[in-house]
Amino acid sequence: MHVGSEQTERGLTALVGRMADSFSRLVTQHLQLARLELEEDLKSASMNVAMIAAFVPFILVGYAFACAALAAVLFPWLGWAGAFGVVALLNLVAGGGGVAWALHKLKTRRMMDDTTDELSRSMAALTAPAPMSLGNSLQGGDGHLFKEPPHGR
């Protein structure tokens, strides 16, 4: 009479079903996390690109003033050309510094960082060996877990 094995089979079926549900939920949550993180990363990247676009006019104005200053330098020896030169230099420094700062922020940002970390933790948990029990304290601690008695009851 193997009543215990019949209950064990039903218990195993339920456990496998719960494990499949849990795994499905885990995959769904990873996909949701990846989608949310991708949206956040795209927003951040687009803000950095917008900052670059905002500083480009400073460079263009600086270049225009630099060209005007160079032309004016050739006219009389310094007068209003010095003023154009200072304005051009300030625009070039401000625009170049802003673009360099935005590019640095864009390069240092790790894309999908949280998703990668969560996926690594999940894979480590799924591939880790099952913990071994130290013994069966209900059966006197002889180390035989879930062993059926010899008479089958």
Image (cartoon, grey):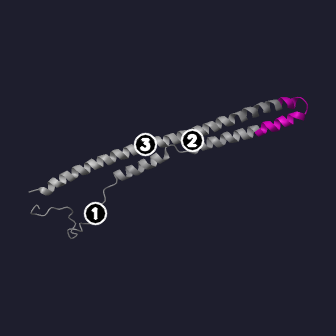
- SS at mark 1? loop
Asked if residue 78 can be seen in this view, the reply is no
- Residues packed near mark 3 inside 10 Å, few (<14), some (14 to 19) or many (20 plus): few
Count of numbered labels shown in the rendering: 3
- Please give the residue where the numbered disc 3 appears in the rendered image: 32
- Within the magenta stretch, is there residue 56? no
What segment carries the magenta color?
A: 70-90
- Residues packed near mark 1 inside 10 Å, few (<14), some (14 to 19) or many (20 plus): few
Q: Which of the two labelled residues, at mark 1 and mark 2, occupies the earlier sequence position?
A: 2
Vertical placement of residue 76 versus 130, above or below: above
70 or 115, which is in the foreground?
Answer: 115
- Please give the residue where the numbered disc 1 appears in the rendered image: 133
Q: What's the residue at 49%, 44% (across, down)?
A: 112
Residue 27 position in % (x across, y down): 37, 44
Amino acid type indicated by mark 1: Ser
Dividing the picture into quarters, in which one does residue 48 lie? top right
Vertical placement of residue 108 versus 74, above or below: below
Dividing the picture into quarters, in which one does residue 92 lie? top right
Q: Which of the two labelled residues, at mark 3 and mark 1, occupies the earlier sequence position?
A: 3
Q: What's the residue at 33%, 48% (across, down)?
A: 22
Q: Nearer the viewer, mark 3 or mark 1?
A: 3
Amino acid type indicated by mark 3: Gln
Q: CA distance from mark 1 to mark 2?
A: 48 Å
